[in-house]
Image: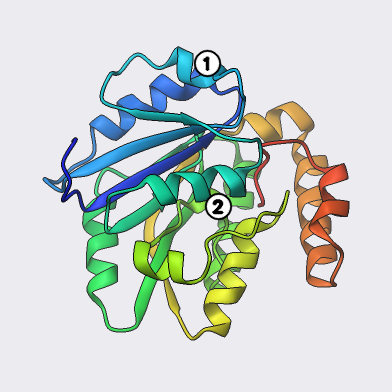
Amino acid sequence: MQDTTCKFSIIVPALHEGPIINDLLESLARLQGKELYEIIVVDGDPKGTTIKSIHQKNIQCFSSGPGRARQMNAGAHLARGEILLFLHADTHLPRNAFQQAGLILKEDGYIGGAFDFGIKSDKVVLKLIAKVASWRSRLTRIPFGDQAIFIKKDYFLSLGGYKDIPLMEDVELMQRIKKSGGKIFISSEPVFTSPRRWEKEGVIYCTLRNWFLLTLYYLGISPTKLAKFYPPGGSSV
C-alpha cells in the first residue's frame, strides 16, 4: 500500500479509539478490488493513545491538535491519493467501497460522494433511525461524516478543506460544495456505524439531541455554542 501513485487515501480521525482501531483496520484489509490505497490515522490526543494501540505496521500515523476537522485537514495535506475518503473509527465500509467510489467519480459533474447510512444493530428502532438518516441525506444531498464522505483531493484542497469548527464541519463542507456547483452522489451501498453512542446515551435522547442541534445550526447558531451540548467524537446524525 505504500505507493506514490495510490488512488485512495483513507483518513481516519481518532480520539481515544484504542479499543476499536484494530478492528477497523482489519476490516479495511478485507476490502475488494486492486486499487492502491493508503491509510492515515490522525490522533487528536497529543499523547497518541490510539496510535500506540495500532498493531499493523503499514499504517501512516500522525498526531494533531484535537478537533475532527483539524485532524481530517491534517490527513488530507499528508495524503498522496487522488481521492480522499474520510472514515470514522467506528464505521465500517462496504467491501466494494473502492469500486463504488471510483464509478461515481467517473460520472460527469460528480466531485465526491458518500455511502448510505446503516447502524450495526438488529434493534428495530436503530434500523428506523438509520433509514430516516438515509432519506434525509438523499433529500438534502448533504451526507454526514459517518457516511464515509469521499472527494477528489484537488477539489477538496481548492475549497480550503474542512472549516476548523468544533461541530457540523461535515454539513458546512457539503453546503459549500453545493454553493460552488459541485455534485455529491449518495451510493446505495451502506456503511455500518457502531450503535455505541445510542446505547450509551439512550436512543431517544441521542436522536432528539442530534436533530435539535442540527436545526439550531441551520437557524444560524454558532457551532462553537452548539459544541457545549455535544460529546467529543459524536455522530452528526
Q: Is residue 19 above or below residue 140?
A: above
Q: Is residue 152 above or below residue 192?
A: below
Left or right placement of residue 190 versus residue 160 in this view: left
Residue 92, position as x, y percentages in the image: 41, 38
Quarter of image, res 93: top left
Please give the residue where the numbered disc 1 appears in the rendered image: 19
Q: Is residue 201 above or below residue 69?
A: above
Please give the residue where the numbered disc 2 appears in the rendered image: 145
- Give the amino acid at mark 1: Pro
Which residue sits at x=85%, y=64%?
A: 216
Q: Is residue 165 visible?
A: yes
Quarter of image, res 229: top right
Residue 192, position as x, y percentages in the image: 46, 41
Which residue sits at x=83%, y=57%?
A: 212
Secondary structure, mark 2, is helix
Left or right placement of residue 213 versus residue 234 in this view: right
Left or right placement of residue 5 versus residue 133 in this view: left
Which residue sits at x=79%, y=57%?
A: 223
Q: Residues within 10 Å of mark 2 (few under 14, many from 20)?
A: many
Q: Is residue 186 visible?
A: no
Q: CB under 8 Å between callouts 1 and 2? A: no
Left or right placement of residue 9 versus residue 121 in this view: left
N-terminal of the pair, mark 1 or mark 2, is 1
Q: Residues within 10 Å of mark 1 (few under 14, many from 20)?
A: few
Residue 129, position as x, y percentages in the image: 64, 51
- Give the amino acid at mark 2: Gly
The Cα atoms of the two marked residues, 1 and 2, are separated by 21 Å
Q: In front here: 149 or 45?
A: 45
Q: Is residue 198 above or below residue 16?
A: below
